[in-house]
Image (cartoon, rainbow, N blue to C red):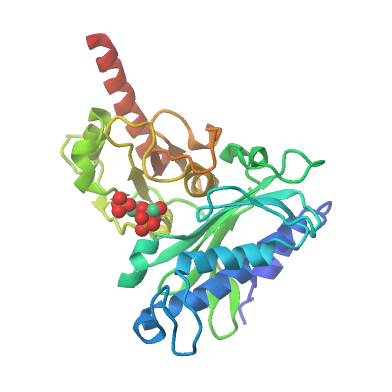
């Protein structure tokens, strides 16, 4: 009989001997939140029967938007455990403090509770993204500064994909490991140990309808991906428009995901702290690379919680080629000026 490895067992086995189990338990908390959110998102197709957000459903319960629901589940499971000093969520403008009545822990949780939520109504896969940092100041209760750290300093990061099946993929710095939720047991089982980006990459993912808003360097790079140059790679286009789903496919098949800056702005649409940062950490752990076009995402120190960033991530050869296109355009622009 083949061995079944539950997520609890795997996380525990990976815990270093000196560890007190705080991080291990925090990861369990997130896995539990993922199961609860998966249960709810699986029923999203029943929305016509159960009532839309803001309405009352047939059981007389008031409906919440699913992303607010997901935020509340994570917050409720994590705020009282003594493992966190602060949370930052896509759904809340300010950092979410740990209430004074609970003891303060040594980790910071940054998360996007339900990314790609515009896809829910059309039954397309969505996801939760999370990152975990050590808090910076152990004396005081959590402050915004504790969260404003570069992704290189992440202790752990991961995502949950609510798709045809629910998967939790995470890393604590020793590879990327994927678990699939077995709905019969209600348990995440190890299904994808030690994920590495395959070579050669198969796909590129970008919303090409924004082509005219991009800088010349990005336009040339996308032309190159599309096969318009003699040395173009043999990659095919795939874009779902749901970050976790696009990321997951490219992680398994190899490729590059691009969300460039538009109209001369420094940032794109995606958020540095709880979208780009954790995924950059994972892609690095899988042998790839993430860049804003000029520097590694892992090195960018956030200046505010909801900061946006241009994002290119995937197989290193493709992302470095993008950086070359941008550098050449920058140099050409400087020579003209
Ligand atoms: P959404 O607006 O549906 O929440 O993070 C936001 C996000 O989705 C990502 O999941 C997705 O990759 C991106 O936006 C899609 O943006 P475009 O529609 O502009 O392509």
In the depicted structure, whether residue 156 falls above or below residue 28: above
| Residue 16 shown left or right of residue 278 in the figure | right
Q: Residue at x 34, y 65 (%)?
A: 119
46 or 294, nearer to the observer: 46
Which quarter of the frame holds ligand 1?
Answer: bottom left
In the depicted structure, whether residue 240 falls above or below residue 311: below
Q: Report x, y in % for residue 105.
A: 77, 52
Res 103 → quadrant: bottom right
67 or 289, nearer to the observer: 67
Q: Report x, y in % for residue 58.
A: 44, 89
Q: Quadrant of the N terminus?
A: bottom right
Q: Residue at x 38, y 41 (%)?
A: 312
Q: Is residue 242 visible?
A: no
Q: Report x, y in % for residue 14.
A: 71, 58
Res 136 → quadrant: top right
Res 44 → quadrant: bottom left
């Amino acid at each position: 009989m083949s061995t079944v490895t539950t997520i609890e067992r795997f996380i525990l086995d990976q815990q270093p001997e000196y560890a007190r189990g705080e991080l291990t338990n925090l990861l369990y908390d997130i896995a539990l939140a993922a199961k609860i959110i998966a249960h709810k998102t699986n029923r999203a197709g029943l929305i016509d029967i159960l009532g839309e957000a803001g309405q009352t459903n047939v059981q007389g319960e008031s409906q919440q938007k699913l992303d607010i629901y997901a935020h509340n589940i994570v917050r409720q499971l994590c705020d009282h455990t003594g493992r966190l000093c602060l949370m930052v969520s896509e759904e809340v403008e300010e950092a979410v403090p740990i209430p004074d009545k609970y003891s303060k822990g040594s980790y910071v949780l940054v998360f996007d509770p339900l990314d790609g939520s515009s896809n829910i109504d059309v039954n397309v896969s969505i996801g939760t993204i999370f990152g975990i940092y050590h808090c910076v100041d152990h004396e005081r209760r959590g402050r915004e500064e504790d969260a404003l750290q570069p992704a290189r300093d992440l202790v752990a990061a991961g995502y949950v994909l609510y798709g045809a099946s629910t998967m939790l993929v995470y890393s604590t710095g020793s590879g990327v490991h994927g678990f699939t939720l077995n709905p019969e047991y209600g348990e995440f089982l190890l299904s994808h140990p030690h994920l590495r980006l395959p070579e050669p990459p198969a796909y590129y993912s970008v919303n090409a309808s924004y082509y005219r808003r991009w800088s010349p360097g990005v336009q040339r790079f996308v032309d190159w991906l599309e096969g318009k140059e003699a040395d173009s790679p043999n990659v095919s286009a795939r874009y779902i428009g749901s970050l976790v789903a696009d990321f997951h496919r490219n992680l398994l098949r190899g490729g590059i995901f691009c969300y460039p800056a538009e109209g001369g702005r420094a940032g794109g649409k995606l958020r540095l702290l709880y979208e780009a940062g954790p995924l950059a950490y994972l892609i690095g752990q899988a042998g790839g690379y993430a860049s804003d076009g000029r520097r590694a995402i892992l090195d960018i120190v956030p200046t505010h919680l909801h900061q946006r960033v241009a994002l290119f991530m995937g197989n290193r050869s493709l992302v470095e080629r993008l950086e070359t296109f941008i550098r050449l355009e920058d140099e050409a622009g400087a020579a003209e000026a």
